[in-house]
Image (cartoon, coloured by chain):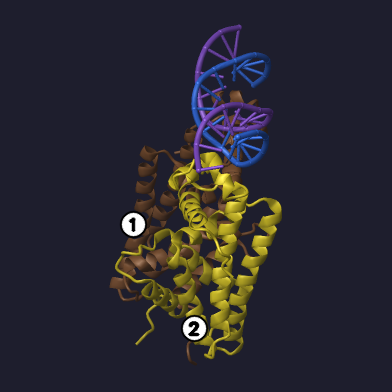
Chain colours: A yellow, B brown, C blue, D purple
Amino acid sequence: MAVAASEKKMAIHRAACRLFRQHGYPGTSVRQIAEEVGLDGSSLYSHVESKDDLLWEIVHEAAHQFLSALREVRDSNLGIMQKLRNAIITHVGVITSDMDSAAVYTFEWRHLPPGRRTAFTALRDEYEGMFRALVDQAIRDRYITAKDAASATLFILSALNWVSTWFKPDGALSADEVGRMLADYVFDGLRRRTA
Amino acid sequence: MAVAASEKKMAIHRAACRLFRQHGYPGTSVRQIAEEVGLDGSSLYSHVESKDDLLWEIVHEAAHQFLSALREVRDSNLGIMQKLRNAIITHVGVITSDMDSAAVYTFEWRHLPPGRRTAFTALRDEYEGMFRALVDQAIRDRYITAKDAASATLFILSALNWVSTWFKPDGALSADEVGRMLADYVFDGLRRRTA
DNA sequence: CCTACCGATCGGTAGG
DNA sequence: CCTACCGATCGGTAGG
């Protein structure tokens, strides 16, 4: 799926990701992005159609990363609870593999122009729907209990979304350890089970 | 604590909150804010020192709302688990009482100038520290189990932070019901306890 | 609270 | 990929 892209274009994407995350999309100028990759502001337009395009390409690619990773989990040959657990761990894995684009995917998509915002939310809704289908099956098979599948899914994804704001690649916990820890919290809760 | 403020100034705050939330701080112009309250752009400066000041006043006031609400819970005459439960419900209550300022508090504070950003993170850290102290006591008293108090607190606050993005005042669930639901999820987890 | 204005910077283009 | 430039808009001020 990854289209052949020049090294320069990839460098522009990385720089834009980093700056969009740090200063927000409206708080980042095309000249800042250009400077990061050693170009004059106007020269950026040899590689990129517009600032809007850059944001779209970043969030669109991130959306497909999340989607394809979750499809793989869903289509695996495992029990529903192991699938749900892997969905959590995999989601954390996608975030930590590129923290900048994950943060832009989560927090900056609302700055897309209307048409593309609609296209983006469709992708995000597809992802959440796939996640919710796993939760729903786990409820039907009586492995988990919840008020309803939608609120339980929202609860899970809330805990996951925030990871891009605090995870430290050089920290005490690896991405996998964070994923397993969050899965444990989500499934077992914090309350001590009476011995 | 609420300083006497003119109606106009409060209207400016509300408009700024709404716009900062919708378009982000850098994506909102002072002229947009002024137009919302029926003023010329330059006239805003009769009521406000600078755009920076407006953001600071909003997040500073929100921080104190969260802090004073949590202090009340902490100082109440209840068992630790009921306090922790009330801390969750109260946090959701503060968010839903003013969704715009809660969203700005959570997502826009990073656009503060350096000095004020430091002051803000001190307030936020004080809040998280107070929350963590409750979690810590619940662990020591053996009501809850967790990898550690810090990660458990992060887990709880992640689920709570996201509420400002999806809660609908006219939706099926009241603020209190959302708070109780999230408290149940956090404490009991999703996994069905074997009968 | 408005009119009139400031220098700086914005996203983007022309022409080479 | 740069030089040179476009009109629009930015946060903010002077003066009344």
Q: Along the horizontal axis of the image, is B58 left or right of A174?
A: right
Per the image, label 1 sits on a secondary structure element best described as helix
Q: Earlier in the sequence, mark 1 or mark 2?
A: 1
Residue B168 placement: quadrant: bottom right
Per the image, label 2 sits on a secondary structure element best described as loop
- Distance, label 1 to label 2, CA atoms, is 29 Å
Residue B192 visible, this angle: no
Can you give x and y, in whole percent of width and height, for residue A121 in the image? 65, 62
Identify the residue at horizontal 31%, vertical 64% (top origin).
Answer: A170
Q: Is residue B29 above or below residue B72?
A: above
Identify the residue at horizontal 48%, vertical 91% (top origin).
Answer: B194
Q: Quadrant of the N terminus of chain A?
A: bottom right
Q: Along the horizontal axis of the image, is B83 left or right of B98?
A: left
Q: Chain of mark 2?
A: B
How crowded pointer 2 is (Cα within 10 Å; few <14, some 14-19, many 20+) is rated as many
Disc 1 marks a residue whose amino acid type is: Gly
Residue B72 visible, this angle: yes
Disc 2 marks a residue whose amino acid type is: Arg
Residue B1 placement: quadrant: top left
Task: Please give the count of numbered marks on the rendered protein.
Answer: 2
Which residue is tagged 1?
Answer: B129
Q: Is residue B131 above or below residue A189?
A: above
**Residue reaching furthest to the bottom:** B195
Can you give x and y, in whole percent of width and height, for residue A7 in the image? 48, 58
Pick the residue in front: B11 or A55: A55
Pick the residue in front: B94 or A60: A60
Which residue is tagged 2?
Answer: B191
Pick the residue in front: A119 or B147: A119
